[in-house]
């Protein structure tokens, strides 16, 4: 009876997915939802025998998952993975159905699964992951999950269902690190040792000791509430990281990192800019080690992960610093949006969409990219759209939660250039291919030509 229901659930899920694709409505949660209705135990059934890493946390999930996938791609390993837009139980279930036989037998040995915090307990209980990775806990999903300590409790509940999992936790985030206390799991901490910012954090998302309520003190800050924290009253303090960045040297478009692991010291290159991507790299390395993957191969693969991110270029137009991040498919777009969401400063984002032959004339992929997460996390005073399909882009952003009143459509390149010049804040342009060529020519001419540098 159970086997029949598994079969039926898989069949219905696949059929629904195929039909939706034919109708041009891929990427919805519906097939997975129906499948779980038919057989609620489906995800547990399909996950059996698959070695799984589950990644959760507020920021960096997508990038860290991407790094882990890139490690497996480099090693030529088969795996399955959900995209960030499908990180609810239904989406994850659909992904497992796609990578199993019609009788529910898994066809891939490994899985990289990104989970929404709210669904994390159910996902962990079903998948019994080998490794659970928590990137950090910030307050930016307040509307969806309430207080940040409330989110922490969700994660603790998930971890409690998977006592065999190795926990990889960010030691520098006091809330995340607290998940490793008093649990039977093996815990691997990662953190940044060699960096200290002069800037005191403004508003901390985790100001008070989780154990006694005293205000945390810091020996070092990296950014936000992350750093070498301790409680002056009860003595609770940042755990000593097993995987640490001893020194971080910014390079053009990335960082050079002296990495310390139990295997010793080594230099690695992280081909994505900014310190939060060093955290993401440490997280990925901690998880890869815990999975038993080749540490040399995994570390080396991070040096060219940036290439997957898409090309990133920077220039200055008048007083405005401009970044251009090429996006041409949902996966690359998700990474660019993640980057945008985690930028600490206020920016003017400009989304450009053409449908020339070189772009692929079908622009419906924008509906598969995860703009929702960006607008759940960030509010922009102004948003620009440009390109032959600016109308589609505007509609997409509106559906993703952007306030339509803030969206400006630039009809010409001159309009766009004016907006950039008068932005009064940094500008981040996310164009697809031919719109990138046009915008880039225009802006680089204004910048005096040839002022671009390529980050990747
Ligand atoms: Zn305390």
Image (cartoon, grey):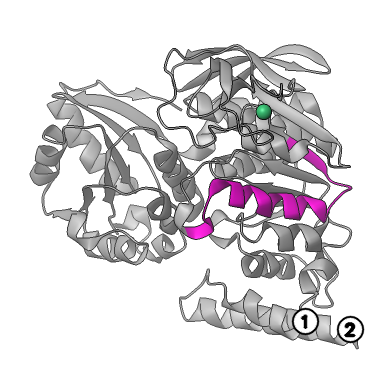
Please name the residue that numbered disc 1 is placed on: 39
Residue 242, position in %: x, y?
77, 22
Q: Is residue 289 magenta?
A: no
Q: Is residue 306 left or right of residue 135?
A: left
The answer, for residue 420, to whether it is visible in the render is: yes
Q: Where the N terminus falls, by quadrant?
A: bottom right
- In the image, taking residue 168 as reference, residue 119 lies left or right, namely left
Are dots 1 and 2 in contact, CB under 8 Å?
Answer: yes
Q: Residue at x 80, y 74 (%)?
A: 41
**Label annotation for residue 2:** 2
Q: Which mark is residue 197?
A: none
**Ligand 1, what quadrant?**
top right
Residue occupying the point 32% across, 57% down:
357
432 w.r.t. 135: above or below: below
Q: 161 or 108: nearer the eye?
A: 161
Q: Is-magenta flag for residue 149?
A: yes
Where residue 435 appears, as percent x and y from the top left, is 26, 47
Q: Main secondary structure of the magenta part?
A: helix
Region rendered in magenta: 144-168
Instruction: Measure how far apart labels 1 and 2 are at the Cα level.
Output: 8 Å
Q: Of the residues under marks 1 and 2, which one precedes in the sequence?
A: 2
Query: Circle 2 — which element?
Result: helix
Q: Which residue is found at the position 76% from the left and 78% from the top?
A: 40
Mark 1 neighbour class, 10 Å CA radius: few under 14, some 14 to 19, many 20 or more: some
């Amino acid at each position: 009876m159970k086997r029949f229901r598994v079969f039926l659930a898989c069949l219905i899920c696949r059929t629904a997915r195929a039909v939706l694709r034919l109708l041009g409505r891929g990427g919805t949660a519906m097939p997975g939802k129906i499948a779980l209705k038919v057989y609620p135990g489906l995800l547990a059934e399909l996950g059996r025998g698959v070695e799984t890493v589950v990644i959760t946390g507020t920021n960096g999930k997508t990038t860290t998952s991407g790094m882990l996938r890139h490690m497996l791609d480099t090693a030529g390993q088969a795996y399955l993975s959900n995209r960030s837009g499908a990180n609810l139980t239904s989406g994850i279930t659909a992904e497992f159905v796609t990578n199993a036989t019609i009788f529910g037998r898994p066809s891939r040995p490994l899985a990289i699964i990104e989970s929404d915090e709210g669904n994390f307990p159910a996902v962990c209980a079903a998948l019994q992951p080998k490794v659970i990775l928590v990137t950090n806990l910030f307050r930016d999903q307040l509307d969806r999950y309430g207080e940040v300590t409330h989110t922490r409790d969700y994660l603790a509940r998930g971890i409690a269902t998977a006592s065999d999992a190795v926990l990889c936790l960010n030691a520098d985030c006091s809330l995340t690190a607290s998940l490793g206390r008093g649990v039977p799991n093996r815990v691997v901490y990662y953190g940044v040792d060699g960096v200290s910012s002069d800037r005191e954090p403004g508003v901390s998302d985790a100001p008070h000791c989780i154990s006694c309520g005293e205000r945390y003190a810091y020996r070092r800050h990296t950014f936000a509430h992350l750093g070498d924290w301790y409680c002056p009253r009860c003595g609770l303090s940042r755990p000593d990281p097993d995987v640490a960045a001893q020194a971080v040297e910014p390079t053009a478009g990335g960082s050079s990192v002296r990495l310390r692991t139990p295997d010793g010291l080594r230099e690695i290159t992280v081909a994505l800019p900014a310190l939060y991507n060093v955290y993401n790299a440490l997280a990925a390395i901690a998880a890869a080690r815990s999975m038993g993957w080749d540490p040399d191969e995994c570390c080396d693969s991070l040096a060219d992960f940036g290439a997957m991110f898409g090309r990133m270029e920077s220039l200055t137009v008048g007083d405005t610093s401009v970044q251009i991040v090429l996006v041409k498919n949902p996966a690359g777009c998700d990474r660019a949006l993640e980057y945008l969401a985690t930028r600490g400063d206020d920016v003017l984002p400009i989304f450009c969409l053409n449908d020339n032959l070189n772009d692929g004339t079908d622009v419906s992929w924008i509906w598969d990219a995860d703009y929702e997460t960006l607008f759940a996390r960030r509010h922009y005073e102004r948003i620009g759209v440009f390109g032959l399909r600016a109308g589609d882009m505007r509609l997409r952003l509106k559906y993703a939660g952007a306030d339509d009143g803030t969206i400006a459509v630039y009809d010409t390149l001159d309009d766009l250039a004016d907006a950039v010049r008068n932005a009064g804040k940094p500008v981040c342009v996310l164009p697809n291919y031919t719109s990138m060529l046009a915008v880039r020519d225009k802006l680089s001419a204004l910048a005096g030509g040839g002022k671009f540098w390529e980050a990747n």
